[in-house]
């Protein structure tokens, strides 16, 4: 008996794994090379800069293209196959054109039971797209996302990885309407909102001139306040435990 295994992308992956332009114009390549030099110089081994370089080329195209992968390979002395293997592993690297604003609705456990699923359904209806698709005007790409480490503000919507906390279907509709109208509201906390391509440059490790990213929300500190009120503190790791270690059964005699 023989078994045939067809290798390739998952059935639910849209389009070919990587698509788009094959090469960059000379001026674009030169500009990217200058940024890449800055990024690569931070690493003792150049190939360690692959992840930020992928964000760099994503900031140029809005998603990964053959031109971007070829640029990374040439900059780091890797094969395009090696670069592609990394690029297609991580979900933050986009394989299809992405809107100006990437709207991610958390549908992980806590956000889901607090209304995340209802928010995603409402936004699909409001935007006229399914999750994973982009509006015709190129403004918004909608997707479900896994836990954003913001369970204390569930349900959470992220726009280009900035937080919009304690959302409802109604507030989320207002949010995407404002994005499409060119009047993006300020995130609940963190730095001011920027476009998806600008966010990719920040993730590449290039200069971010925005301010306000050091805010800590009130709910995040609730446990710390209770600990202070009750005089609770972590044990001193340098203190010697008063408990004797349990005897090792292997050392016992019968």
Image (cartoon, rainbow, N blue to C red):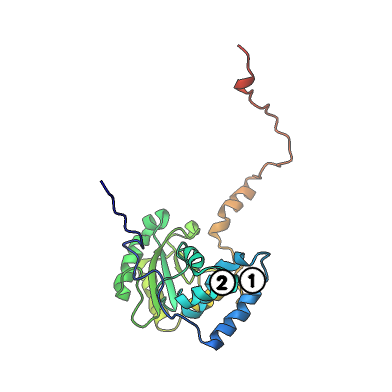
For marks 1 and 2, the one nearer the N-term is 1
Which corner quadrant of the image does residue 252 belong to? Answer: top right
Residue 74 vs residue 112, the one in the foreground: 74
Image-based side of 151 in relation to 191, left or right:
left
Do we see residue 107 in this rendering? yes
Q: Quadrant of residue 140?
A: bottom left
Q: Position of residue 181 (x, y in %)?
A: 40, 83
Judged from the image, the secondary structure of the residue bearing numbered disc 1 is helix
Q: Which of the numbered marks, if any, corresponds to residue 233? A: none
- Circle 1 packing at 10 Å, graded few (<14), some (14-19), many (20+), is some
Instruction: For mark 2, give the secondary structure.
Output: helix
User: Does 215 appear above or below 186?
Assistant: above
Please provide percent x and percent y for residue 90: 47, 63
The relative height of residue 131 versus residue 228 in the rendered view (above or below) is below
Q: Nearer the viewer, residue 76 or 41?
A: 76
Q: Residue at x 70, y 41 (%)?
A: 237
Residue 53 image label? 2
Q: Residue furthest left?
A: 1
Q: Is residue 33 above or below residue 88?
A: below
User: Which residue occupies 51% across, 87% down?
Assistant: 25
Residue denoted by label 1: 40
Residue found 68% across the figure and 26% down from its top: 244
Task: Please rate how many residues cluster around mark 2, counting C-alpha atoms within 10 Å: few if below 14, some from 14 to 19, many from 20.
Answer: many
Is 195 on the left or on the right of 118, as rendered?
right
Residue located at (47% from left, 57% from top): 151
Separation of marks 1 and 2 at Cα, in angstroms? 8 Å
Residue 79 is situated, as x and y percent measured from the top left of the image, at 52, 68
């Amino acid at each position: 008996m023989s078994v045939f295994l067809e290798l390739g992308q998952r059935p639910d992956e849209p389009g070919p794994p990587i698509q788009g332009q094959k090469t960059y114009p000379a001026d674009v390549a030169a500009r990217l090379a200058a940024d890449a030099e800055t990024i690569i110089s931070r690493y003792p081994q150049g190939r360690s800069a692959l992840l930020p370089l992928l964000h760099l080329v994503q900031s140029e195209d809005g998603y990964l293209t053959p031109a971007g992968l070829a640029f990374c390979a040439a900059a780091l002395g890797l094969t395009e196959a090696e670069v592609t293997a990394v690029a297609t592993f991580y979900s933050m690297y986009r394989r299809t054109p992405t809107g100006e604003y990437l709207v991610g609705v958390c549908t992980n456990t806590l956000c889901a039971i607090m209304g995340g699923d209802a928010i995603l359904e409402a936004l699909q209806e409001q935007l006229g797209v399914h999750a994973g698709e982009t509006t015709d005007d190129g403004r918004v790409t909608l997707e479900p996302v896994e836990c954003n480490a913001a369970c204390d503000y569930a349900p959470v919507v992220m726009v280009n990885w900035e937080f919009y906390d304690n959302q409802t279907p109604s507030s989320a509709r207002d949010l995407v309407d404002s994005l499409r109208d060119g009047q993006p509201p300020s995130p609940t906390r963190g730095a001011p909102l920027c476009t998806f391509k600008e966010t990719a440059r920040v993730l590449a490790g290039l200069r971010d001139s925005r301010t306000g990213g050091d805010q800590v929300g009130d709910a995040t500190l609730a446990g710390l306040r209770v600990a202070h009120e009750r005089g609770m503190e972590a044990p001193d790791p340098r203190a010697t435990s008063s408990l004797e270690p349990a005897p090792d059964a292997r050392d016992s005699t019968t």
